[in-house]
Image (cartoon, helix red, strand yellow):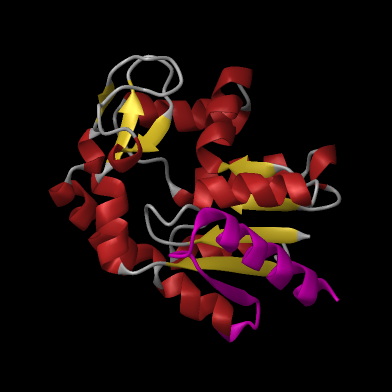
């Protein structure tokens, strides 16, 4: 099963992708992580990407695509995989068509107001990195290690609004792209986490029949 996760920032893609990968025994492939791995290993494309990152520039689509291609050739991807964080734009999605045949694209649909509330209330532990909502830790203390919880700069309300504008302009068009190919499965990401997971599992099993 070869999957892509779509959805706005704060939709819960990371949490749900982790659960899907475990349930269906396929690797969860984060483009950010494979980019870092390629640079650590000193692959040709990893070194090429590093030159852009060190200059503070965005890594070009062509380089990202080649790194994804390298990762998908590895043995653990033979029975399937889940792409998390890629593609983000129509050109990336169109280019991906040339190197991989995606079975299903899971789209987590969440309302604008819910996203803003989720992200602006998100806090990260400055000690262990644990992420939680301020409503679950009103004292501002990490329930895992007891260190202070802080708000990431990109989770401030104004930053969240900007991230949503970027998503609407660049990534949201992918919904129509994959819907037109008959591969889109949309799930209500505004439900409680466990309900979203159960709905995703059910949708994937029906699709695979």
Residue at 82% of width from left, 40% of height from top? 76
Residue 86 visible (yes or no): no
76 drawn magenta: no
**Vertical side of 32 occupied by 167: above or below:** below
Q: What residue span does the magenta drawing correspond to?
A: 180-209
- Quadrant placement of the C terminus: bottom right
Q: Quadrant of residue 196?
A: bottom right
Name the foreground residue: 155 vs 52: 155
| Nearer the observer, 94 or 204 | 204
Q: Quadrant of the N terminus?
A: bottom right
Q: Is residue 6 visible?
A: yes
Q: Nearer the viewer, residue 89 or 165?
A: 165
The residue shown at (43%, 65%) is 190
Residue 72 against residue 180 in the figure, above or below = above
* Residue 27 image-quadrant placement: top right
Horizontally, is 23 left or right of 35 in the view?
right
Residue 34 percent across, percent down from the top left: 59, 34
Residue 5: percent from left, percent from top: 56, 59
Would you identify the image quadrant in which residue 154 lies? top left
x then y, percent, for residue 13: 51, 52
Examine the structure image and report whether residue 198 is included in the region drawn in magenta: yes
Across and down, in percent, residue 53 comes to 37, 29
Vertical order, 10 against 178 (above or below): above
């Amino acid at each position: 099963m070869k999957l892509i996760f779509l959805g706005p920032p704060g939709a819960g893609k990371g949490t749900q992708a982790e659960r899907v990968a475990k349930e269906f025994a396929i690797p969860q492939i984060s483009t950010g992580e494979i980019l870092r791995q390629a640079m650590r290993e000193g692959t040709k494309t990893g070194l090429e990407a590093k030159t852009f990152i060190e200059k503070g520039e965005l890594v070009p689509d062509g380089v990202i695509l080649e790194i994804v291609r390298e990762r998908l050739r590895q043995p653990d991807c033979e029975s399937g995989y889940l792409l998390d964080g890629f593609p983000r734009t129509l050109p990336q999605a169109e280019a991906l068509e040339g190197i991989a045949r995606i079975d299903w694209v899971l789209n987590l649909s969440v309302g604008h107001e819910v996203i803003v509330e989720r992200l602006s209330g998100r806090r990260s532990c400055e000690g262990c990195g644990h992420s939680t909502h301020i409503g679950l830790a009103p004292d501002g203390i990490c329930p895992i290690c007891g260190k202070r919880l802080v708000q990431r700069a990109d989770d401030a309300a104004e930053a969240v609004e900007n991230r949503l504008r970027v998503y609407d302009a660049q990534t949201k068009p992918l919904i129509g792209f994959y819907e037109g190919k008959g591969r889109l499965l949309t799930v209500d990401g505004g439900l409680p986490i466990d309900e979203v997971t159960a709905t995703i599992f059910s949708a994937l099993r029906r699709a695979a029949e």
